Amino acid sequence: MDLIISQHDGNTIAKVEGRLDTTNSPEFEKKMAPMMEGANPNIVMDCKDMVYISSSGLRLFLTLQKSVRARGGQLVLTGLQDSIKEVFDMTGFSSIFTIQD
């Protein structure tokens, strides 16, 4: 798993690569901390290279979503692979997040 964070046109762009599961969720949580504390609450999460997400990963996405909303921003998930989108649909997370192709 890797999380690459950059700034572009007033948005924070976060690119997630690989598997997001129980074994690496603590590392992901540390890497996403600046997005939860940053001045810019608008985040685009590029998930096209994320190949798996577990319940711990879903929890971290939800934590980030709550932080973004509390600061008046928006979290947009892009590029979800079909298998990941299916997990979001089955868990009801598709109705919580803004998901774009």
Image: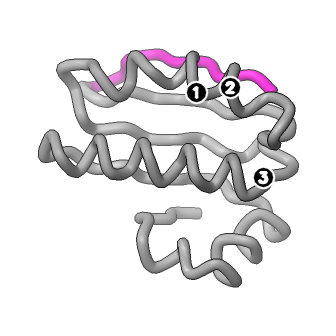
Can you identify the residue that label 1 sits on? Answer: 29
The amino acid on which the numbered mark 3 sits, given as a three-letter code, is Ile
The amino acid on which the numbered mark 2 sits, given as a three-letter code, is Pro
Give residue 73's quadrant in the image: top left
Residue at the image point whose x is 28% and y is 43% from the top? 68
Q: Is residue 2 magenta?
A: yes
Q: Residues within 10 Å of mark 3 (few under 14, many from 20)?
A: some
Q: Is residue 72 magenta?
A: no
Residue at the image point whose x is 52% and y is 41% from the top? 45
Mark 3 falls on what kind of element? Answer: strand
Q: Magenta stretch: dominant SS?
A: strand
Residue at the image point whose x is 77% and y is 63% from the top? 84
What span is in magenta? Answer: 1-9
Q: Quadrant of the C terminus?
A: bottom right
Marks 3 and 2: in contact by CB < 8 Å?
A: no
Mark 1 falls on what kind of element? Answer: helix
| Circle nearer the viewer, 2 or 3 | 2
Can you identify the residue that label 3 sits on? Answer: 53
The answer to whether 4 appears left or right of 74 in the picture is right
Q: Position of residue 55 (x, y in %)?
A: 72, 58
Residue at the image point whose x is 51% and y is 63% from the top? 100
Q: Position of residue 81 (x, y in %)?
A: 78, 60
Q: Is residue 101 above or below residue 37?
A: below
